[in-house]
Amino acid sequence: MIMGRIHSLQSLGTVDGPGLRFVVFFQGCPLRCKCCHNPDTWNMSGGEEYSAQEIVQKVLRYKDYFGKDGGITLSGGEPLMQAEFALEIFRLCRENGINTCLDTSGCVLDEKVKELLSFTDRVLLDIKYTTEEEYRENVGCSMKKPMDFLDFLGEKNIPVTLRQVIIPTVNDIAENIQRLREIIRNNPVIDKTEFLPFRKICTVKYEQMGIEFPFSHIPEADIDAVKKLYEIIGTAP
């Protein structure tokens, strides 16, 4: 029996993919994004242990609420760190007619992840920045990883919702949005774009963990200003 470590569960989420969704937040993440809202998900040994069957049994209780658009979303942390476990969840969901959505940074693309994607109906792909320098400085990995991931999604024709947290003074500039527009133009599988306003409600978590929140000095994003970025990119929110 395949077991995995889960940070938390949300029975009926509305912001993690289409429709109403049962959201599974995985434990463990290899990245150290300076804007991270969930540092408590970093440690792979945290969270609670579940089997894939236990997770899917919980999901099935809410199947009647999903309608034609809803389903399950695997989020994190980073679900790709437990790809075999995620694969078993999605395999069981597919058998039970439940729509599958993967919320990821695209930081891993090995054979097990590719198999997982064959059972994935939609990917919420977090393109955090649009230059290699920004990725190296603010994420801790190369931008090549999510772009290679996006290329593979294109090859397999898996629908993508592109997401980016908009951080004032960091990536809220027109040049960044224009580069993002080019990424969208060059990847037809991206059929939706979501800008997420930077927030600092996570500060208390950093304080409790005794670590510094790297972006604590940056102001929260103005919602109206974020909405205007959709005009630059040429799509509706």
Image: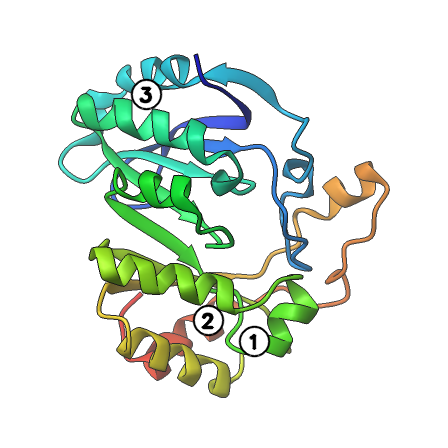
For image coordinates 53% across by 39% down, the residue present is 81
Q: Are marks 2 and 3 in contact (CB under 8 Å)?
A: no
Query: Can residue 173 be seen here?
Result: yes
Where does label 2 land, which residue?
226
Residue density around tag 3, few if under 14, some if 14–19, many if 20 or more, within 10 Å = many
For image coordinates 53% across by 69% down, the residue present is 143
Mark nearer the viewer, 1 or 2: 1
- CA separation in Å, label 1 and label 2: 11 Å
Where does label 1 land, which residue?
171
| Quadrant of the image containing the N terminus | top left
In this rendering, the answer to whether 227 lies above or below 84 is below
Where does label 3 land, which residue?
59
First in sequence: mark 2 vs mark 3: 3
In this rendering, the answer to whether 200 lies above or below 127 is above
In this rendering, the answer to whether 158 lies above or below 117 is below
Identity, as a three-letter code, of the amino acid under mark 1: Asn
- Colour approach in the figure: rainbow
First in sequence: mark 3 vs mark 1: 3
First in sequence: mark 1 vs mark 2: 1
For image coordinates 65% across by 32% down, the residue present is 44
For image coordinates 32% across by 46% down, the residue present is 17
Dot 3 falls on a residue whose secondary structure is: helix
Dot 2 falls on a residue whose secondary structure is: helix
Identity, as a three-letter code, of the amino acid under mark 2: Val
Residue density around tag 2, few if under 14, some if 14–19, many if 20 or more, within 10 Å = many
